[in-house]
Image (cartoon, grey):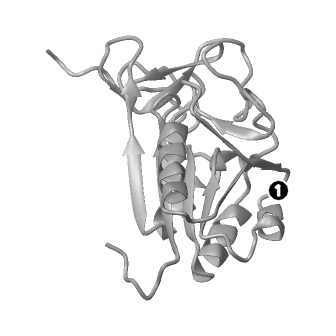
Amino acid sequence: MFHKTLPGFIEVICGSMFSGKTEELVRRLKRSQIARQKIQVFKPALDNRYSTDHVQSHDSNRLPSRAVEKAKDILRFVDDNTRVVGIDEAQFFDDSVVDIAQKLAYRGIRVIVAGLDMDFQGQPFGPMPKLLAVAEQVTKLSAVCMICGGPATRTQRTSGTSTQKIVVGAKELYEARCRFCHEPHEQENGEGEAYPAPRPAV
């Protein structure tokens, strides 16, 4: 429970691709609408996979949103009577999104942020670690591993040879994997040796 005299706070929804992050974001925002609270939703302009003016989950749940080039643009567009702000695909923003979320929370706004916590190499993604640190509430979701069927917490890039961290795509480029089925390829430990770790004995 959050203190009634301090209504502003930050919630972060994180996990791998196909874990239902945007679906959960939309669910929470729709509940706020039912409670007659004004919501506004933002996403990075970079993410145009399904729509330029909606946030949309892989199973087509969606809400109208505003695409912004930079996180700092969000402050310009938030109305005075807005009670809840949703931010989707936060990993694509720079670290300024953390400060934006903090400022909105101190203004008494509930801020719900969704994003990938790890990139395709299994490394912390963009501003997400800092958002997780400052949030009052964190929800980590898992998908289903496409290899073994276990809980998937990582995202496997399955197509192309690009080593760029940000390559926007969906099922044609990525699938969910568990720790042991994930193959990060370029990921290295401190001694320059590739891993993942060996699978546990069964």
**Is residue 117 in sight in this rendering?**
no
Closest to the observer, 33 or 90: 33
Whole-percent x and y of residue 85?
63, 62
Whole-percent x and y of residue 14?
48, 46
Quadrant position of the N terminus in the picture? bottom left
Left or right, 41 with reference to 176 = right
Query: Is 122 placed above or below 134 here?
Result: above
Closest to the observer, 200 or 153: 153
Give the secondary structure at mark 1: loop
**Residue occupying the point 55% across, 34% down:** 192
Q: How many marks?
A: 1
Query: Is 43 placed above or below 136 here?
Result: above
- Label 1 neighbour load within 10 Å: few <14, some 14-19, many 20+: some
Whole-percent x and y of residue 133?
48, 65
**Is residue 55 in sight in this rendering?**
yes
**Residue occupying the point 38% across, 34% down:** 142
**Residue occupying the point 47% across, 34% down:** 20
**Residue occupying the point 52% across, 49% down:** 30
Whole-percent x and y of residue 156?
53, 22
Left or right, 194 with reference to 174 = left
Image quadrant assignment for residue 52: top right
Kindly identify the amino acid type of the residue bearing the numbered disc 1: Lys
* Residue ranking furthest to the bottom: 5
Left or right, 71 with reference to 24 = right
Residue that numbered label 1 is attached to: 70
Query: Is 178 placed above or below 39 here?
Result: above
Image quadrant assignment for residue 95: bottom right
Closest to the observer, 169 or 118: 169
Quadrant position of the C terminus in the picture? top left
Query: Is 139 placed above or below 135 here?
Result: above
